[in-house]
Image (cartoon, grey):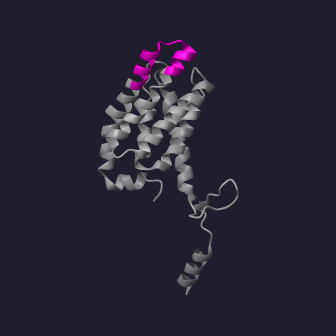
């Protein structure tokens, strides 16, 4: 009897772990998307880890020669596109403390967002690792225009730094992760 009452109560209860996402017009989309508490928490955690790991090695995270180890995290978007908002938010927060300030918040974050888009559309992990190097090379334009660094040198060194971190280091790490179904299951935001 208790078990039946419990089951009935659970069926009638609104589950707090699922929060419906409404559109700006106030209407629900035809196929109702849901944002889970897990997604919100993971977005915050990823943003904090990205920002903190960028600041931890701040001299290497900004400038014409960049080794932003936090960029390895962008490969999480290959596993689950739901990581993209947290990575973009982390990039925004990290770039507030860039020598270029708001310029880097806008321009640098746009480059990371473009890389994340490419990563989420990539057919395989290796191709996904090239997007950060390609997209973030354009940060060299920002460095040239606002800090006076040589254009091609800046583009090449930023791209090389991204390639080193994401492809040379991140690729083997994520190949290992993708070879383990338990890790994949735990890392997926959308279960």
Instruction: Say whether residue 115 is left or right of residue 174.
Output: right
The residue that appears at 35% across and 28% down in the rendered structure is 164
- Tell me the quarter of the image containing the C terminus: bottom left
The residue that appears at 58% across and 34% down in the rendered structure is 92
Q: Looking at the image, which is closer to me, 112 or 96?
A: 112
- Tell me the quarter of the image containing the N terminus: bottom right
Principal secondary structure, stretch drawn in magenta: helix
In the displayed orientation, state which residue is furthest to the bottom: 1
The residue that appears at 43% across and 40% down in the rendered structure is 118
Image coordinates of residue 63 in percent, x first then y, are: 49, 19
In which image quadrant can residue 157 be found? top left
Image coordinates of residue 94 in percent, x first then y, are: 55, 31
Image coordinates of residue 167 in percent, x first then y, are: 34, 34
User: Does 109 appear in magenta?
Assistant: no
95 to 75, vertically: above or below = above
Residue extent of the magenta highlight:
141-159
25 to 52, vertically: above or below = below
Give the total of numbered labels: 0
Q: Looking at the image, which is closer to me, 46 or 102?
A: 102
In which image quadrant can residue 119 be found? top left
User: Does 155 appear in magenta?
Assistant: yes
């Amino acid at each position: 009897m208790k078990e039946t009452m419990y089951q009935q109560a659970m069926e009638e209860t609104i589950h707090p772990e699922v929060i419906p996402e409404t559109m700006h017009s106030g209407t629900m989309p035809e196929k109702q998307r849901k944002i889970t508490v897990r997604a919100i928490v993971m977005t915050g955690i990823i943003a904090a880890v990205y920002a903190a790991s960028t600041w931890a090695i701040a001299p290497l995270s900004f400038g014409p020669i960049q080794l932003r180890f936090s960029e390895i995290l962008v490969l999480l978007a290959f596993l689950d596109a739901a990581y993209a908002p947290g990575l973009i938010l982390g990039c925004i927060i990290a770039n507030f403390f860039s020598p270029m300030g708001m310029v880097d918040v806008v321009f640098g974050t746009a480059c990371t967002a473009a890389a994340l888009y490419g990563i989420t559309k990539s057919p395989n992990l290796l191709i996904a690792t090239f997007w950060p190097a390609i997209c973030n090379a354009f940060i060299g334009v920002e460095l040239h225009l606002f800090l006076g660094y040589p254009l091609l040198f800046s583009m090449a060194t930023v791209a090389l730094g991204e390639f080193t971190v994401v492809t040379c280091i991140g690729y083997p790490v994520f190949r290992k992760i993708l070879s383990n179904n338990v890790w994949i299951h735990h890392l997926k935001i959308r279960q």
